[in-house]
Image (tube, rainbow, N blue to C red):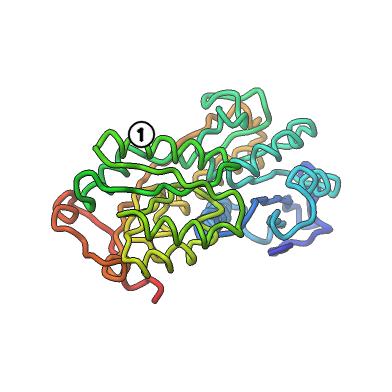
Amino acid sequence: MALTLVAGSPAAAGKGGETQPSGMKTYRVLIVMPVMHPSLDSAIEGFKDGLASHGLASLRVTYVELEAAAQTQGIGQIVTSELASGVDLVLALTSRAAQEAVEVTSRAGVPLVYTAVTDPVASGIVTSMAASELHSTGVSDRYPVPEQVAFFDKFLHAGASIAVMFSPDEVNSRILSSKTREELIARGHEVVLVEVADDSEIAEKAKAAAAGHDAVVINGDNRLVNHLDVVVRHCKADGTPLFVGDPESAEHGAVAAVGPSYYDLGVDAASKAARILLKGEAAGDIPSSTPRVLRYVVNQAAARQMGGSIPAEVWQSRDIWESVSARSKP
């Protein structure tokens, strides 16, 4: 997706909002991400629905959605270009997008709301979770790594060999893969970190990981989630279970996940954006937040396709589970 204009009139948009003849103020919101995949789709959907629930339906907002992978420019250049056309607020998805965008938006005094960011303070997107000296606030997707690994462990035999795949150029992925490795080792498993530095490496690295290990884990990596079908294919071929951090990926072929609802993250981000646009609050004065709800998801079809089933211990560990076997890809 190179450029999508959703509702509203570009002529009506402008910094600080424009007032139509009817007296209704309209806004222009830039949404920027490095790549598009189902989790980010859900976050954007939640953000738009959230703004609509605050009275900012499509007739009042022009959305400009830009995916950096479809552009010849970097995210910072993309945001700079769009700010020149007038933008009231920027929604940045993922650590990489928010890191690059906040440098531009803070200099320009344009508020930025982020989501799908693992550690916004360490990434320099906000100066603290309580408040920020930058023009930024948002919702972290901080994954509950101890809970995730405790869950994955129910599928694994003692001393299992596990490949944790990650992209070294993604801050969030480096953080989560390291924490995931530590938790798995603490539970007695052997762990190998598998770096995937480029899209062209995914098939080869996924094939080797699936063939050489008892399980594969992908936890919050945008590059790999964007090409999840490649990893799923190799895990099915070798009967190696794939575990993920985002529930949307469980719906698209992984065995199971414990993670935040990206739709709800988008809704929460919209609440902060509404305070900025409608009440005039400064973004830096609005505290950042973490996920309110975690989804526990299992994919029975994927488990069968990857050489196993859902252990009874998994079903017995919680009162409520989401089973997504009907939505899994063949």
Percent of width and height locating residue 325 = 31, 69
On the rendered structure, is 86 left or right of 273?
Answer: right
Return the residue nearer the eye: 167 or 30: 167
| Position in image of residue 235 (x %, y %) | 38, 64
Q: Residue at x 65, y 44 (%)?
A: 97
Task: Please say if 228 is above or below 246.
Answer: below
Q: Residue furthest bottom?
A: 330
Instruction: Please give the count of numbered marks on the rendered protein.
Output: 1
Which residue is at a point 21% across and 64% down the rendered structure image? 309
Q: Is residue 185 left or right of residue 139?
A: left
Left or right, 38 with respect to 80, comes to: left
Image quadrant where one finds the N terminus: bottom right
Q: Quadrant of the C terminus?
A: bottom left
Quarter occupied by residue 15? top right
The residue sitting at 35% across, 47% down in the picture is 294
Residue 267 in view in this figure: yes
Q: Amino acid at mark 1?
A: Glu
Residue placed most toward the observer, 47 or 144: 144
Determine if residue 63 is in view: no
Q: Which residue has dot 1 on it?
A: 182
Q: Secondary structure at mark 1?
A: helix
Residue in view at x 14 percent, y 53 percent: 313
Crowd rating for badge 1 (residues with CA inside 10 Å; few <14, some 14–19, many 20+): some
| Residue 222: % across, % down | 54, 51
Indicate the position of residue 185 as horizontal and vertical percent values: 30, 36
Quarter of the image for residue 192 reads top left
